[in-house]
């Protein structure tokens, strides 16, 4: 069961409430006794796998020359 804490009390206990939420507890913040917000722990960050798209993108033989060439006047105008 989540605990309901009025905002006035939460201001003085914020550090403790955040620690409790981080430990997995759900805390409801209330204003004048009415539920207003929920303080819950963040979901754990997913680890990223480096190179998971390796081999899925193919670049043409002329990619470096084409990618590094200066833009034409028409292409520049498109960016303005």
Image (cartoon, rainbow, N blue to C red):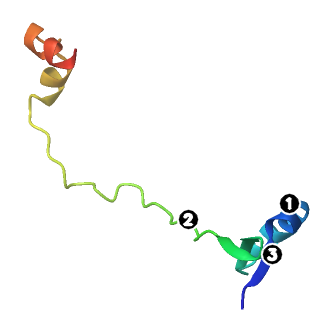
Q: Nearer the viewer, residue 37 or 68?
A: 37
Q: Which residue is mark 2?
A: 45
Q: Which residue is mark 1?
A: 11
**Mark 3 vs mark 1, CA separation in Å:** 10 Å
* Precedes in sequence: disc 2 or disc 3: 3
Res. 74 image quadrant: top left
* Residue 31 against residue 23 in the figure, above or below: above
Q: Which of the two marks, 2 or 3, is nearer to us in this view? A: 3
x, y percent for residue 25: 73, 81
Asked whether the residues under the numbered discs 2 and 1 touch, taking CB atoms below 8 Å apart as contact, a structural biologist would say no
Which residue corresponds to the image point at 42% horizontal and 61% vertical from the top-left?
49
Secondary structure under tag 1 reads: helix
**Mark 2 vs mark 1, CA separation in Å:** 28 Å
Label 1, residues with CA under 10 Å away: few <14, some 14-19, many ≥20: few
Which residue corresponds to the image point at 9% horizontal and 28% vertical from the top-left?
62
Asked whether the residues under the numbered discs 2 and 3 touch, taking CB atoms below 8 Å apart as contact, a structural biologist would say no
x, y percent for residue 4: 77, 80
Label 3, residues with CA under 10 Å away: few <14, some 14-19, many ≥20: some
Give the quarter of the figure containing the N terminus.
bottom right
Asked whether the residues under the numbered discs 3 and 1 touch, taking CB atoms below 8 Å apart as contact, a structural biologist would say no
Secondary structure under tag 2 reads: loop
């Amino acid at each position: 069961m989540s605990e309901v804490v009025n905002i006035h009390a939460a201001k003085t206990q914020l550090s403790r409430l955040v620690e409790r939420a981080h430990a997995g507890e759900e805390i409801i913040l209330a204003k004048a006794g009415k539920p207003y917000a929920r303080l819950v722990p963040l979901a754990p960050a997913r680890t990223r796998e480096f190179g998971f798209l390796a081999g899925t993108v193919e670049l043409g033989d002329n990619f470096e020359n084409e990618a590094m060439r200066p833009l034409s006047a028409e292409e520049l105008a498109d960016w303005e």
